[in-house]
Image (cartoon, rainbow, N blue to C red):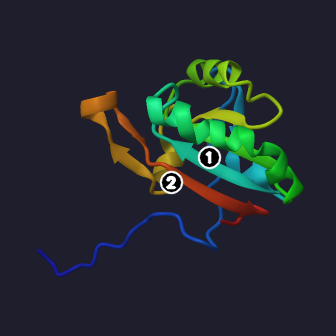
Amino acid sequence: MDDQKVVSSQAAEGDSLPSVDVDEGKPGQTVNIADLFKGKKGVLFGVPGAFTPTCSETHLPGYLEMSEELKAAGAEVVVCVSVNDPFVMAAWGKQNEAEGKVRMLADTKCQLTMALGMEFDATERLGSIRSKRYAMLIDDGKI
């Protein structure tokens, strides 16, 4: 085997967001993540799963509670992404009254999560590859 270095493909400050479609509300109702943040400032955060205890008790509620402060600080869009189906993300958003505060996007095929290098194998606990917990400040499509 060659002495090759393994280089992390995890997203880093200064990187552009990948041009990846995710679902909002229902399958086929897509949003391109790069287009969503083009010319805007905002926050993109990822969680392992909708309705999971820590994500439901801490992560999402924190962004919902701080939504007005985030807007006052210049965030034009705040997005929650999880490797779930869009129906689950919509229901989780509805239960938590996220409308108008946090957009709930489903990375159904894990494409955005993998493009950002934020995936981990949660097969034993959640049944599939999932997203790590992360938060990114985005300015005109740049992390």
Kindly check if marks 1 and 2 are in contact, taking CB atoms under 8 A apart as contact.
Answer: yes
Instruction: Give, as a three-letter code, the residue at label 1.
Output: Val
Location of the C terminus (image quadrant): bottom right
* Depth check, front residue: 93 or 58: 58
Q: Quadrant of residue 60?
A: top right
Tell me the residue that label 2 is attached to: 115
Residue 80 in the image: x percent, y percent?
64, 40
Q: Does residue 137 lie above or below 127 as drawn?
A: below
Instruction: Give, as a three-letter code, the residue at label 2.
Output: Ala
Residue 93 in the image: x percent, y percent?
67, 25
The residue positioned 34% from the left and 32% from the top of the image is: 128
Q: Does residue 125 lie above or below 40 as drawn?
A: above
Q: Classify residue 54 as left or right of residue 65.
A: left
The residue positioned 64% from the left and 36% from the top of the image is: 61
Q: Classify residue 119 as left or right of residue 11.
A: left
Disc 1 or 2, which lies upstream in sequence? 1
Circle 2: element type: helix
The residue positioned 17% from the left and 81% from the top of the image is: 3
Q: Quadrant of residue 85?
A: top right
Location of the N terminus (image quadrant): bottom left
Q: Residue furthest left?
A: 1
* Depth check, front residue: 36 or 46: 46
Circle 1: element type: loop
Tell me the residue that label 1 is attached to: 20
